[in-house]
Image: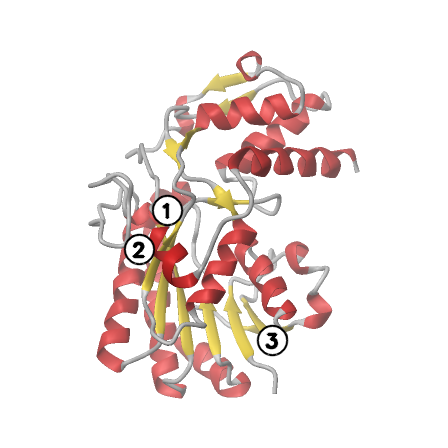
Amino acid sequence: MAKRALITGITGQDGSYLAELLLSEGYHVVGMVRRSSTETFERIAHIQDQLTLVSGDLLDEVSLINILQEHRPHEVYNLAAQSFVQTSWAQPVFTGESTAMGVTRMLDAIRTVDSEIRFYQASSSEMFGKVQAVPQDEDTPFYPRSPYGVAKVYGHWITVNYRESYDLHASSGILFNHESPRRGLEFVTRKVTNGVAKIKLGLANELRLGNLDAQRDWGFAADYVRAMYLMLQQDRPDDYVVATGETHPVRELCEVAFAAAGLHWENFVVIDPQFMRPAEVDLLVGDPSKAERVLGWRREVDFPSLVEMMVAADLKALQR
């Protein structure tokens, strides 16, 4: 009998790549989506006929219990959240309800329905915030610098708490920034690559950005969902940092992206104070050695290849 997996946030970047991976492994994949007039299935349109999509919401525990009872998944991957850092300052309470309390509702639903279900929580490098050590690993203290980061810390620790209190197979992946052509336009990587494509095609003449000195550890999303899957195949649940171990400033992102289109970034990038964060996270770089050692995980796509892939995809989409 095929294993069954439930993915919350299946219409997002990570959800779509994870669904592809699980289908390739022979899983029956159930995707939870919110009833919304703006829900888009663009990222999963090519595999939608292979998925079972169900209506549910992390704000409503009854809906989660009903989904678990009806579909009886062996694994649950909780990827749904209010996941845009900038928005979390404008919507801090909603961010807490979905990104923090939503994790508790799902864990409690699992405990109620079937404690044998294996659970993956999408934790975030934003939990490290004002970093207390470089690089960051599983033992680095958290110091979040946004309502989103604070909510993710809660989600992380409630996962640990339920694992220890109820003996659940519940693991957290502390994922550093992971990007792809499927990344939302509100994220800086995609904002840059899409901006480059527009400038190259004569559809724009400048790109407005905030802090060019902020540094991030950027990897390819399809590599990172493989780590999620590997965590739930282990005999024992645990927490893992998933990262490249390299850091790159936004300025370098611009250099590589514009160069991929045969342009020079300094001719087009404009610093705009409205894109500065109230509290900046300056340097995030992860130590993935535990994931490499225990899970056998390795990233396959390097930073320049990732950026060039995204620019090429945005050029192709805009030309189409």
Q: Position of residue 230 (x, y in %)?
A: 46, 66
Mark drawn on residue 194: none
Q: Which residue is mark 3?
A: 27
How are the colours assigned in the image? secondary structure
Q: Based on the displayed image, in which of its 4 quarters is residue 231 positioned?
A: bottom left
Disc 1 to disc 2, how far (Cα)? 9 Å
Q: Nearest to the eye among marks 1 and 2: give it.
A: 2
Mark drawn on residue 88: 1
Residue at x 53% of width, y 52% of height: 223
Which amino acid type is marked by label 3? Tyr
Compared across the picture, whether 296 is left or right of 139 comes to: right
Disc 3 to disc 1, how far (Cα)? 34 Å
Q: What secondary structure is marked by label 1?
A: helix
Residue at x 28% of width, y 45% of height: 136
Compared across the picture, whether 187 is left or right of 89 comes to: right
CB contact under 8 Å: marks 1 and 2: yes
Compared across the picture, whether 126 is left or right of 118 comes to: left
Depth check: give the residue in front, 47 or 227: 227
**Mark 2 crowdedness (10 Å alpha carbons): few <14, some 14-19, many ≥20:** many
* Earlier residue among tags 1 and 2: 1
Mark drawn on residue 151: 2
